[in-house]
Image: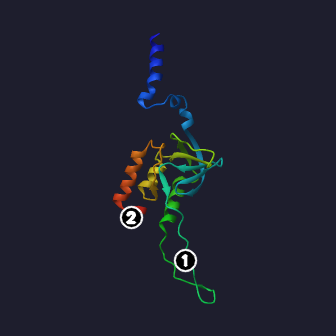
């Protein structure tokens, strides 16, 4: 009898602790493992089963800029000396590919795991060594911070990683 009262009290009071009853029963639906077959952008991966996952809390800086091509009066390409530097966006994509591509990762979903309307899932991506890819990309300055409610579970950690990159002038924050 006492056990029954305790269990009922626990489940009725769980929302007061910040734990939803659905979360208690659907925990397994909020985490899974998957193989990353392609890193499309620093904030977008493709899983082995074809699902596309956007990393929560981060936003890609965009694609590397295309080189500007000049033409002479006859329409011939004017050859310009090529700079030996690699654009930051290209460095960021290479880093993200090294971090996640062809690796079995853990996916943790927040309140909004995504919808079928835009075709993306939204997740925190955990690397085989347990590090969160979202945080690592922010810490290196290779992505922008983008917090979109209701997915705010790790907002504080993401902000700290962004502030670290900004303080150390890494990546996008180096300007």
- Assess whether mark 2 and mark 1 are in contact (beta carbons under 8 angstroms): no
Residue 116: percent from the left, percent from the top?
Answer: 63, 45
What is the residue that sits farthest to the right in this orientation? Answer: 49
Circle 1 sits in a helix, a strand or a loop, which is it?
Answer: loop
Which residue has dot 1 on it? 68
Q: Does residue 113 lie above or below 161 as drawn?
A: above
What is the residue that sits farthest to the bottom in this orientation? Answer: 73
- In the rendered image, the quadrant that contains the C terminus is bottom left
Residue 129: percent from the left, percent from the top?
Answer: 48, 46
Chain-order first, disc 1 or disc 2: 1
What is the residue that sits farthest to the left in this orientation? Answer: 167
Considering depth in this image, is 76 or 131 the residue closer to the camera?
76
Residue 163: percent from the left, percent from the top?
Answer: 36, 54
- Residue 159 falls left or right of residue 83: left
Q: Residue at x 57, y 42 (%)?
A: 33
Quadrant for residue 152, please give it.
top left
Q: Residue at x 43, y 44 (%)?
A: 154
Q: Residue at x 57, y 49 (%)?
A: 53
Give the mark toward the camera: 1 or 2. 1
Residue 72: percent from the left, percent from the top?
Answer: 59, 88
Q: Residue at x 45, y 26 (%)?
A: 14
Specify few, some or many for label 2: CA neighbours under 10 Å numbering under 14, 14-19, or 20 or more.
Answer: few
Considering depth in this image, is 146 or 87 the residue closer to the camera?
146
Dot label at residue 167: none
Quadrant for residue 97, please give it.
bottom right
Which residue has dot 2 on it? 174
Circle 2 sits in a helix, a strand or a loop, which is it?
Answer: helix
Q: Does residue 122 lie above or below 89 as drawn?
A: above
Considering depth in this image, is 20 or 32 the residue closer to the camera?
20
């Amino acid at each position: 009898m006492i056990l029954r009262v305790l269990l009922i009290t626990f489940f009725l009071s769980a929302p007061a602790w910040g734990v939803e009853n659905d979360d208690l029963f659907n925990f397994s639906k909020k985490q899974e493992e998957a193989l990353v077959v392609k890193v499309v952008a620093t904030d977008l991966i493709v899983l082995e089963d074809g699902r596309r996952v956007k990393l929560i809390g981060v936003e890609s800086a965009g694609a590397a800029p295309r080189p500007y091509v000049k033409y002479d009066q006859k329409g011939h390409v004017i050859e310009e000396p090529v700079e030996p530097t690699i654009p930051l966006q290209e460095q960021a994509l290479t880093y993200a590919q090294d971090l996640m591509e062809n690796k079995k990762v853990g996916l943790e979903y927040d309140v909004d795991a995504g919808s079928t309307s835009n075709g993306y899932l939204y997740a925190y991506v955990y690397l085989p060594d347990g590090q969160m890819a979202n945080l690592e990309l922010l810490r290196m300055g290779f992505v922008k911070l983008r917090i979109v409610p209701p997915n705010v579970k790790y907002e504080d950690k993401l902000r700290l990683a962004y502030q670290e990159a900004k303080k150390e002038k890494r990546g996008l924050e180096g300007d």
